[in-house]
Image: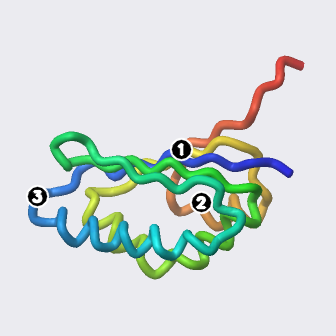
Amino acid sequence: MTRIEVLAVFPDIAPGNLVEFKQRAAELLEISVPESGTLRYDWFFADDDTKCAVHEVYADSDAMLVHLGHMGHLIGRLVELGGGIEPTIFGTMSPDLAAAVASFHATLYTRFQGK
């Protein structure tokens, strides 16, 4: 089993978008609760509420695919409200997960074990 970690940053939340952004984020938090493969799903806001970082940890690629399936209807709007999305993914993804996240243009890192 290979864990997948994600750091997704919404870089530019306009003041007029903040209330709706937080409402959509709250919906995603509720959606993630029953997902047994979602090991961490924490949202952090900058002190001035203009940026948001989401730290996610999934048991494996399949668990992240399940999460993406549950949140797909909300992510487009969050990207609009958040001024884009800057995702960084850590871990070795399955081909299915790589295809599912390709449109996000994430920075990808695979684990180095010194060998």
- Residue under label 1, please give it: 88
Does residue 45 appear left or right of residue 65 in this picture?
Answer: left
- The residues tagged by marks 2 and 3 sit, at their Cα atoms, a distance apart of 30 Å
- Residue under label 2, please give it: 102
Of helix, strand and loop, which one carries label 1? strand
Of helix, strand and loop, which one carries label 3? helix
Observer-side mark, 1 or 3, equals 3
Location of residue 103 in the rendering, given as x and y in whole percent from the top left corner: 53, 63
Observer-side mark, 2 or 3, equals 3
- Residue under label 3, please give it: 15
Q: Residue shown at 21%/55% (left/top)? A: 13
Q: Residues within 10 Å of mark 1 (few under 14, many from 20)?
A: some
Q: Is residue 48 above or below residue 67?
A: above
Can you name the residue that lies furthest to the right here? 115
Location of residue 62 in the rendering, given as x and y in whole percent from the top left corner: 76, 66
- Label 1–label 3 contact, CB within 8 A: no
Looking at marks 1 and 3 on the same chain, the residue that comes earlier in the sequence is marked by: 3
Q: Is residue 34 above or below residue 40?
A: below
